[in-house]
Image: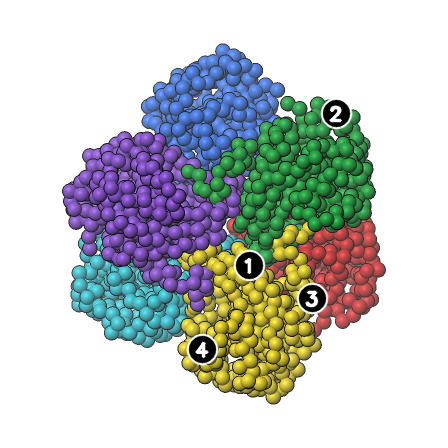
Chain colours: A blue, B red, C cyan, D yellow, E green, F purple
Amino acid sequence: MKKIITFGELLLRFSTNIGERLFQTDQIYSHFGGAEANVAISLAKFGHKVYFVSKVPKNPLGYAAEKHLKTNGVHTEYLRTGGDRLGTYYVESGVGPRSAQVVYDRKYSSISQLALRDVDFEMIFSGAALYHVSGITPALSPSLKETVLYSLQKAKQFGVTTSFDFNYRATLWSQQEAAIAFQTFLPYVDICSCGELDARYLLGIEPTGDTLEKREQLAYYYQQIQLMYPNIQWLYCTFRDVISASTNILQGNIYTNGTLYQSKMHPIDQMVDRVGGGDAFAAGILHGIMREWAPEEIAAFATAASVLKHTIRGDYSNFTESEIRDFIHTTPGKIVR
Amino acid sequence: MKKIITFGELLLRFSTNIGERLFQTDQIYSHFGGAEANVAISLAKFGHKVYFVSKVPKNPLGYAAEKHLKTNGVHTEYLRTGGDRLGTYYVESGVGPRSAQVVYDRKYSSISQLALRDVDFEMIFSGAALYHVSGITPALSPSLKETVLYSLQKAKQFGVTTSFDFNYRATLWSQQEAAIAFQTFLPYVDICSCGELDARYLLGIEPTGDTLEKREQLAYYYQQIQLMYPNIQWLYCTFRDVISASTNILQGNIYTNGTLYQSKMHPIDQMVDRVGGGDAFAAGILHGIMREWAPEEIAAFATAASVLKHTIRGDYSNFTESEIRDFIHTTPGKIVR
Amino acid sequence: MKKIITFGELLLRFSTNIGERLFQTDQIYSHFGGAEANVAISLAKFGHKVYFVSKVPKNPLGYAAEKHLKTNGVHTEYLRTGGDRLGTYYVESGVGPRSAQVVYDRKYSSISQLALRDVDFEMIFSGAALYHVSGITPALSPSLKETVLYSLQKAKQFGVTTSFDFNYRATLWSQQEAAIAFQTFLPYVDICSCGELDARYLLGIEPTGDTLEKREQLAYYYQQIQLMYPNIQWLYCTFRDVISASTNILQGNIYTNGTLYQSKMHPIDQMVDRVGGGDAFAAGILHGIMREWAPEEIAAFATAASVLKHTIRGDYSNFTESEIRDFIHTTPGKIVR
Amino acid sequence: MKKIITFGELLLRFSTNIGERLFQTDQIYSHFGGAEANVAISLAKFGHKVYFVSKVPKNPLGYAAEKHLKTNGVHTEYLRTGGDRLGTYYVESGVGPRSAQVVYDRKYSSISQLALRDVDFEMIFSGAALYHVSGITPALSPSLKETVLYSLQKAKQFGVTTSFDFNYRATLWSQQEAAIAFQTFLPYVDICSCGELDARYLLGIEPTGDTLEKREQLAYYYQQIQLMYPNIQWLYCTFRDVISASTNILQGNIYTNGTLYQSKMHPIDQMVDRVGGGDAFAAGILHGIMREWAPEEIAAFATAASVLKHTIRGDYSNFTESEIRDFIHTTPGKIVR
Amino acid sequence: MKKIITFGELLLRFSTNIGERLFQTDQIYSHFGGAEANVAISLAKFGHKVYFVSKVPKNPLGYAAEKHLKTNGVHTEYLRTGGDRLGTYYVESGVGPRSAQVVYDRKYSSISQLALRDVDFEMIFSGAALYHVSGITPALSPSLKETVLYSLQKAKQFGVTTSFDFNYRATLWSQQEAAIAFQTFLPYVDICSCGELDARYLLGIEPTGDTLEKREQLAYYYQQIQLMYPNIQWLYCTFRDVISASTNILQGNIYTNGTLYQSKMHPIDQMVDRVGGGDAFAAGILHGIMREWAPEEIAAFATAASVLKHTIRGDYSNFTESEIRDFIHTTPGKIVR
Amino acid sequence: MKKIITFGELLLRFSTNIGERLFQTDQIYSHFGGAEANVAISLAKFGHKVYFVSKVPKNPLGYAAEKHLKTNGVHTEYLRTGGDRLGTYYVESGVGPRSAQVVYDRKYSSISQLALRDVDFEMIFSGAALYHVSGITPALSPSLKETVLYSLQKAKQFGVTTSFDFNYRATLWSQQEAAIAFQTFLPYVDICSCGELDARYLLGIEPTGDTLEKREQLAYYYQQIQLMYPNIQWLYCTFRDVISASTNILQGNIYTNGTLYQSKMHPIDQMVDRVGGGDAFAAGILHGIMREWAPEEIAAFATAASVLKHTIRGDYSNFTESEIRDFIHTTPGKIVR
């Protein structure tokens, strides 16, 4: 089996109980997470041989982060240790009309101190089939921006399929900074997660003057992106209708060969934990592409994977392919006994 | 006061916190439950003198099961002890679109090892007014199948009103096996809980070719059942519209003397625990019949009892008759102070 | 900064976990609360200098009650100690269709034993800008009824703006008793919280024969009240549409100078704790009036403050003015990161 | 089987987690308890037919208190309902060197409002073998003091064995008040729990001038008490050596026919909950006397019952006679598998 | 690296909170455990390549059991799936003088249904260095008794070092049955865990008439065993002085070449979880033998490993070799910062 | 009332449940703490007007840290905001023989980025009576080392009594670095907390060749220190005998005018949380000195304050002076009711 590589930061997350503000009580919940690590775990759960590239400190927090990956089936041979600290963040859980609030404490993290020379991408990409990274990684330090570009170029040299998820975070850098960086990456990207706002504000694509449905508008943006970067084979994103922090409606979109495929719309009520929902979707898309499923099947699968993630506490989806298929084919909410 | 008898298995249930998968954390919740035991407890709570017939092992699990009954007002003089083990089962709680998952570990349970000669039904039915058993009990072993048939026949000999709830469980036996067994029971049944799928797949009644509303379709099935088994005086079931694992709409149906009576439709949001909802409904029906209420009142009461059960953790409903009446007559969700 | 004074009872509340009945498990949650104390805390959080007038026993419960106020920024110089006990109450949390149930154990509380001569209102009102009390306080004892009347009269003598919230509690006194008391208070009130039922059953205002929308009906009642008590400058209340104990729709109303202003309607799903929702609304109204905002802005702010309160466990709102403004200007439920 | 009667207050207790002060977090534990009710439950657990005489309010707290008794096998036919409130108390759990702190909120409780005429002692004592009451009950109100005296006299008239436990509580009344009351009771008492301090300060018995061991000193006091009240057949108490709130050494004493019998000394480490330890001891003594065991056997059993109580959370001992016997005959702390 | 093989049952354990009896509350803790699995995990943690041979059902309980092993670094290629159920057991946690109580529900477990032909020991033992099994495995069924004997013989054929831990469980079989079985195994055993009671009651070795110290007595027994089974190179056990369920004193013993080596005595106070303490000791011994440490070093290490296990919740020790060494070389209880 | 100033870092601490390793479950406990902040809180609790000088980030973690101080009565006017992050640390709770493990993540904290010019010590010390800082603060950055020296000099200029606690942390700097820094501070110190190891390894004082008792040895060291720094009026430390992580024996020492005063020895069993024990002791010493108590009374009080801290979860002692006095005068562990 060929390797899958993901590259990014692994963070320690603290979150409150539903209905409690940060530090309202002295009890808090801890989970390990991070966009590319979540994707890695889902892909490992689907049966792939996945390696996570990152750097964690040499202390019990770093060891626990590494154990988190191993427990969930991800290979850690390419995980560097050292540096100053493990990034952390805090989530005040949202509920009903009240939004979740996120506070980051990720500055000076070990991975942000990673230098290009610290990673042997030639060794990593030899025997690899797929490489996934998101727009969070280059935002963490200038050195990582350089490293991400290098890694994408190297991956293409080694014939590895590349996957890039925009994941723009306004708290890490400006739109302008991100736009410049992303535009250097995209010529080396085969599969790309990006939404309407990304297309508009980071790639500078103007909406058509015509009154279009949401679906048609997205197709238009994706068409434009492929004109700019004909190397991109797949584009994908979700439509999320936020009724409240507890109720969302989710629909998955995937675009290839000039056609946009959509999953059905999934209402999600009494949402448990939204963090990692996008990563579960990305992992579903990548799994489908690796398995060469039909685009409509990929959209259905990835969206179902994401929906299920919203119903469990923690950052990553630990559902198997067969559990996700069962979910697609049965009435949501029916007791199974 | 005349005795009410129920006969079945008492199990120990383990369930997860909402939002957690089985064994995601080391904390789990334990409750005692079982269809006929839940009915017994509700009827005891309504003021009846109820006896539960079963068999539990002679160990702390069996003693705890017995205490569970006593605590909730059920008489345990007819509870046999001995045999190998107490059946258990595991519920991964569902939430939002994700269904609950049930794993049974009930094989070789003490009650499944019960022999016909172990129970003195003559003594049990003397002075009894009502006997209730469900289709789970005969599914547990050939010996219990024989015992259930015998018990229904004996009950009729003693002039006891008999109540049978189909409760077909596909994990315990095939439709064909259940169909054969149930058809031997029905000639001795006065009150019967059975739904559309039961009528069609276990009693072999074909749907009418006409386009009927759900309500008319059910009335048609019940009419056919009474043609087959004129001894059955009452038929009942709920319509459950599963929006998600957290949101259901429930409506109760009861059929007697050729007429179908329906409760209003109750939306249930943020559902806490669905297990035992059907048992609470059955207990409400039986209570109403014992009290000789009007059918529409029975339907309203039983449905309300079931709705309330969905809002509390655990297998049985511990609401009193007056609490259920209050619920019927006030706006659901209004704070009472 | 001028002082704000509120006067009322501080209680210790016990509440169950969602999905559990009272004493179903041995774990229960404790919070301090009370209508006027909750208003005091919100106003302190908004930056005012707030004093709470009350009486608590000289024991660890009284000390904890006092600490609760101090922790939340309320001045306790006017808090008397002594008397027999701290009032308590028990809330069986409602969920979905099942209503919350409240059991009071507040008889013989220290504040109910407070005599008029125990409080030096001249000292308290000197340098004060606003005085707030609700209809719960006079219901606690004849002596408190007399004290409330005296305090309102005294406040007006000192040029203090007075605020009165009907807060009629049927478990404390009859409509007739309350009506008589409230009608003696109203001539001294500048700002008044009262709803349709209050207008009708406590002030004896008949509905118009015409078929009016809810909004017009309320405007009519408020018009009538101002005819009876021209001293009242502001009238306010919320419309609460109770879908279930977990889902409400909330809209705020404020009336001044002959015009009724309404907030938009806020759906609240997966409600966490409804207790104190009205107090958060009142505090928002008072804050807006103190700040001399436009009426529509006051309505929007106060309703948002109340909505947010419903999403956290505990009796009082601890959101700052800027958090509430953020809530008004962002999509409810969007993750903030 | 003849009846056993106990008479006293049933309270709702709130306690903190070990290592937390009162209201340090919003989580607290609730249990029902009360000296005579705890004795009643232990005796019921030992197989006796026990009735508890008391008064609880007609509200969900009162119903829960009644359910607590029934769940634990105590008959509640003589439990009156009505009055103002259920007494409560708060325990800040002690640990290591830090003592537990108790705050009572029991004033105006329903039982304290009980009048002599409210209880039909003739009916209650007819068919009874044993009557137990403690010195807490008469301390609650003048009316209860009168009622306790009357009840003891009445019990003797009906040939019922009487048991009185001093249980002097300095927060309820002065030594002088208690002394006067107790001395009117003792002429009607057959079995009496009283310790050295009781003998000295409530019965006015001076210590001997001689240097005596603790054991000899106690025997001396008991000798003197029997000289004063020759009707008392049995006297008992524990020696408790308080190393810390977590570590005690317990030894039981029982005196009859001029001889003092002692259990062995039981070290108790990592104590879980001390409340109710004395009641478990009293119940063990009464059970032994009822069963006519040898005094040394009674002392061993009662002390073991008390030791086990210290190892579980909650107010009463729910160990069976056979579990207590097993404890006596095995090495404490050995795993049983 | 050569393989290590262990063979036994993996169970699901439920345990109460400290201070709570079984089913006193509805909250319970679940862990996976089992003697040979615990040894496997510790050895994997120490850096060995360990395989666990067993059989678990094809259901979520079986999958979770398998995940438990993988998460902790144990290879599961030789784990068979199928059969009726996963064995479970219940632990009522002991504390202070009260012993823990264990209730087993392991009858009909999948492994007990394993047949000799189901396991390919030739494949398993090829490339293996060490094979460990305990006396629990053969007690589970006649077929397993046969399989254990066969496996030990096969291991010796393949030149694998064999390790056998008596682990006699009186609830599984009689002393006589165990004695017969064990005596057939011992001729094929190189390393053996057995204590004084084992030597006396299962191997029939009489104590010397002389008054010997505990240490000398054990040396005598081990000498006798080696006379009977000269193939046994290593014998080991712990001395456990049970002060209470919370306080034990532990000392490790290992015997080889005619000399008994002892660790120092480790007092353990405020013990958290005793289950698995013996398995942690066995794993420490086996690790030391594999690493060819000096016997005194092995005794020190294995005892330290066992002591640390007593301080954490759960069945297995997850301490690394370096953490155990740190523990040996620092003052127990000193804060490390 | 004159001001008391303390200066140091405020950290967010995460700790595990007793019996759990870091990240063994997803539940963790959070508290705010820090040596000088803990001292500040205790002194505020004792009735002083205390100000804490520090720097915390402008984010919800910083706001929560500030609220922690205010809630506990400490003035925050001199708390600067800004900088990169709030320091955090993780405690794996020790129990029995297993030590607690601390992992720091405090690098790049806001306070470590504080520059000398950021603090207006002239304003701070005007009207101040006492200034307390510990050896942790100068270890955090070169700039803080400079700032601490400057602050001590400035304090002396303003006639403020100065207090310095060695608090040497080997993870922050080497003995040599600390020694150099501390020796520049000591000429400006009036009250000093330092132990035997500090005297020996940081001040280079050799032990006497004579065989001295522990007490005499300490007196000798203190004598030598006063010879070196005659400005130091008071020296103090505790003797801590670590039996295990759960059992310590604590004794307080204070030295002044050539005499060493000692408290009695306090055994602490079932220790809850050792963190902050030294800070509670320091606060007790400073309180006693401020109140001009006799040295033996100071030693008794400070040690009692420290002992009580060990019995509660969290970093600081929230006991009042009168609670500490009660503890001194009653038998430890006696229930107070």
Mark in the foreground, 2 or 3: 2
Q: Is residue C255 above or below residue E255?
A: below
How many angstroms separate mark 2 from mark 4 (CA)? 80 Å
The residue drawn where x is 34% and y is 56% is: F300
Do the residues at discs 2 and 4 belong to one chain?
no
What secondary structure is marked by label 2?
Answer: loop
Task: Give residue E219's quadrant in the image.
Answer: top right
- Chain ID at mark 4: D
Residue B248 horizontal/vertical position (percent): 57, 49
Residue B75 is tagged as 3
Residue D45: x percent and y percent?
Answer: 64, 67
Q: Identify whether B228 is placed above or below C114.
A: above
Which residue is more in the foreground, E271 or B335?
Answer: E271
- Pointer 2 residue: E159
* Image point (30%, 75%), residue name: C143
Residue type (three-letter) at the residue carrying disc 2 = Gly
Q: Are marks 2 and 3 on the same chain?
A: no
- Are the residues at dot 2 and dot 3 in contact (C-beta closer than 8 Å)? no
Q: Position of residue A224 (x, y in %)?
A: 42, 19
Q: Quadrant of residue B68?
A: bottom right
Using residue D100 as the reference point, say whether residue C278 is left or right of it.
left
Three-letter code, disc 1:
Ile
Name the secondary structure under disc 4: helix
Q: CA distance from mark 3 to mark 4?
A: 50 Å
Foreground mark, 3 or 4, reads 4
* Residue farthest along the right direction in this orientation: B117
Q: Residues within 10 Å of mark 1 (few under 14, many from 20)?
A: many
